[in-house]
Image (cartoon, rainbow, N blue to C red):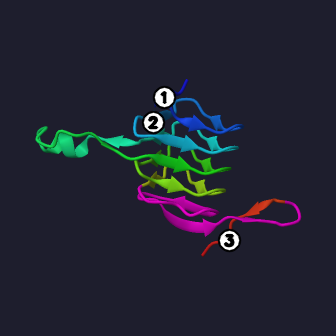
């Protein structure tokens, strides 16, 4: 029950929830082992400049989205065109991602901003999320 436009590259073991929109018209790559929660929107194009110019700007802007390996994207999050999200990052539910997200970083809010680091225990591999 996802809506997919274009030909995204989706890694093995990635789960995509219902009611998700993946606009790969400008290119979308999602790594291995990701969880893309229900209602997430991933956009690789924008018609904003074309629209507000009364079509005097004739182009549809496009830029690829790259989501690394083992990335968690919470329900209802929006990822804008041109964004790269690093490995093992977390995007909180409802966040609007307008800029790149570093690996092992947790972002939240509108626009999304860093709220914690993602640390994996070397012995168990279990995650913790220290703030700051």
Under circle 3, the secondary element is loop
Q: Report which residue position mark 3 lands on.
A: 130
Is residue 115 one of those drawn in magenta? yes
Q: Which residues are magenta?
A: 98-124
Asked if disc 1 and disc 2 are in contact, CB closer than 8 Å, the reply is yes
Q: Which of the marked residues, 2 or 3, is nearer the chain's N terminus?
A: 2
**Between 55 and 94, which is closer to the camera in this rendering?**
55
| Residue occupying image coordinates x 72% and y 37% | 13
The image shows residue 11 at horizontal and vertical percentages of 65, 39
Q: Which of the marked residues, 1 or 2, is nearer the chain's N terminus?
A: 1
Q: Report which residue position mark 1 lands on.
A: 4
Q: Is residue 102 above or below residue 37?
A: below
| Residue occupying image coordinates x 56% and y 67% | 115
**Between 109 and 56, which is closer to the camera in this rendering?**
56
Regarding residue 75, the answer to whether it shows in the image is no
Quarter of the image with the C terminus is: bottom right
């Amino acid at each position: 029950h996802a809506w997919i436009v274009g030909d995204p590259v989706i890694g093995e073991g990635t789960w995509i929830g219902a009611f998700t929109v993946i606009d790969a018209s400008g290119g979308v790559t999602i790594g291995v082992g990701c969880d893309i929660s229900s209602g997430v929107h991933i956009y690789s194009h924008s018609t904003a400049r074309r629209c507000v110019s009364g079509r005097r700007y004739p182009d549809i802007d496009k830029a690829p989205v790259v989501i690394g390996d083992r990335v968690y994207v919470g329900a209802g999050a929006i990822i804008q065109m041109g964004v790269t999200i690093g490995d093992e990052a977390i995007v909180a539910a409802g966040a609007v991602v307008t800029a790149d997200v570093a690996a092992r970083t947790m972002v939240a809010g509108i626009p999304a901003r860093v709220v914690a680091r993602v640390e994996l225990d070397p012995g168990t591999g279990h995650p913790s999320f220290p703030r700051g």
